[in-house]
Image (cartoon, grey):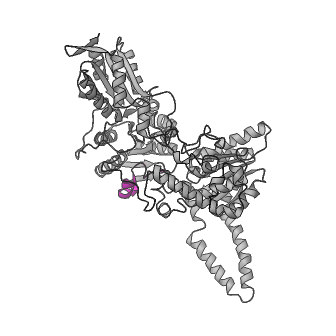
Amino acid sequence: MGTLLNLINGPEDLQQVPRSELPRLAREIREVILDVVSRSGGHLASNLGAVELTIALHYVFDSPRDKIIWDVGHQTYTHKLLTGRRDAFATLRQRHGISGFVRPDESVHDVVVTGHGGTSISTALGFAEARDHLGEHHKVIAVIGDGSLSTGMAFEGLNNAGALRKDFIVVLNDNEMSISPNVGALSTYLSQLLTGRLYIRFRKDVEAFLRSIPGVGEQMRKMAKGAEESLKAFLTPGILFEVLGFKYVGPLKGHELYDLIDAFERVKELDCPALVHVYTKKGKGYPPAEKDPVHFHGIGPFDLETGRERKRGPVPTYTEVFGKTLVTLARDNPRVVAITAAMPHGTGLAPFSAEFPDRFYDVGMAEQHAVGFAAGLAARGMRPVVAIYSTFLQRAYDQIMHDVCIGKLPVVFALDRAGIVGEDGPTHQGCFDYSYLRSLPNMVVMAPKDENELQHMLLTAIEHPGPVALRYPRGTGCGVPLDTQLSPLAIGKGEVLAEGEDVAILAIGNMVPVAVASAQALRADGIGATVVNARFVKPLDSTLILSLASQIGRIVTVEENALQGGFGSAVLELFEEKGLKGVKVRRLGLPDRFIEHGSPASLREEHGLTCEAVCARTKELLGIPLRVQTGRLSPR
């Protein structure tokens, strides 16, 4: 028997499927998602939880005429399968394949680029306002999770939407999780009102009493059931959203397709702001993901039968080394506290939270608050370590500048997933932190060459009396031994790893091992290269760099960051400030465009950040072909 999914090339085909067949379609979609993600990795739990919701949206609304705007976008695999990308789905997150997020250049059904949480309501409200200005007639729907709803931007959008009174729908996909379990007062309000012991006991007692009344008890129980639904509407978050100017609908069971379709059909007829509250289960339909949705949020290839991720090998990740080192340092320093924005597992802080629960803070998906909160802690003598992915720290730039740097407060920013991240694509690549942080006065910016140096840098950062940004890449380290005794590094001092007279290669972070390998390859060709582990983007080791520039006169800088405003730019600025002329410089890094999705290895090869590419660009700078003369290179 053929599959229903193979008959669907767009929402118009879906709308021809009898309602009775839709549960079968949901099962087929889950099977496809599980098959592809188990082989290539991806966001699993969130997508399994949004299958019925997505089917219902496309069954009722007329995309692309009606605009469905997804928050974050990592829950849109079903959306992709229903909007013409079924045959390309096996290429998910692969270079030149389809994105794991929403991309307008991929489909007319993808309305805007989406990769960060909390943006959908504001964007959708803008679409609704533009629709009315243009005299158009269609629906605008924002789909947002309860984790994203905790962001300040989401509430700003809700507040403005209620004031404008636009024909506009918000679908709240409430699975009680963002990436890790949600925290905060709003999350508690959303999840506990109808599950509290007092309410449950009261309901059971009343129901038992009514059943005990001879003759009329059952009828009265049914009447009370209707009254209970009214009570729910008052007790649940409906009152909050009604105050904000929304017509509240729900809460609905997010895996009951028929109920969802009926609700959306009713809401479609409204001409005022409406919020549809839907409860879903992350990982729905796959027991391992239901049991551990945190682990299966974003996962690499895994065994579909057992749910076990394929073995990575014995080398720890930078994230793991960071987390273990922070625990060790916190044992000796009671003022060390850790802060994350809804990602205790992703940032490696789960061990810290287990050992020091009273010194660990998960503030929810609220990066601005995380930084402001850290500033308050630091101002009173604590040593806060704020662990946030590089791409997400961008959301708190004003707080870094205004709340931390102006006051020279000792806040440590641990920037995980810095540089090329890989399959998550342009919204998640951490390619701009050197550029957006090094311009801030009082900020120290550094990056380790390997996981062992990361340990020493973390100690250095915690002991420094001002703000420090420590950035490190995604994935496993270099496999070097880890020191058990740590010592702080001298701020602004680099390290010479190899010496040569023909060219100086200045590298930072995870490009240092590439530079070392390049120097070894160049030496085999008779070219002597000095290799410097710069360690610091700010402050630069100006004494060392100027000395090498004066002596050698040929400099190559290598970084996994945008070239604009990055490490290489800092070196050029140093030469200009000191009036150093006649130095040949070649900067290697990422180009002035957003980096697409693909494996990190393929992206580094594509953008010239491999040993072979560094050697080729270095020879180009030196004017190869060259001849060797007394250990030095000179033109033919």
Seen from the viewer's position, the closer of residues 606 and 431 is: 606
Q: Quadrant of residue 133?
A: top right
Q: Position of residue 578 (x, y in %)?
A: 35, 15
Which residue is the extreme one toward the right?
A: 135
Q: Quadrant of the N terminus?
A: bottom right
Q: Quadrant of the C terminus?
A: top left
- Is residue 350 positioned above or below 195 on the image? above
Boundaries of the magenta span: 341-358
Seen at 26% across and 13% down, the residue is: 627
Seen from the viewer's position, the closer of residues 412 and 471 is: 471
Horizontal relation, residue 151 to residue 438: left or right: right
Q: Position of residue 55 (x, y in %)?
A: 65, 55
Say if residue 182 shows up in the picture: no
Which residue is the extreme one toward the left?
A: 630
Which residue is the extreme one toward the bottom?
A: 214
Horizontal relation, residue 69 to residue 281: left or right: right
Seen at 64% across and 46% down, the residue is: 84
Counting labels gives 0
Q: Position of residue 160 (x, y in %)?
A: 68, 44
Q: Would residue 530 be counted in the magenta stretch?
A: no
- Is residue 110 positioned above or below 38 on the image? above
Q: Quadrant of residue 19?
A: bottom right
Q: Position of residue 361 (x, y in %)?
A: 44, 52
Horizontal relation, residue 151 to residue 327: left or right: right
Seen at 62% across and 50% down, the residue is: 79
Q: Would residue 346 be counted in the magenta stretch?
A: yes
Which residue is the extreme one toward the front?
A: 1
Say if residue 17 shows up in the picture: yes
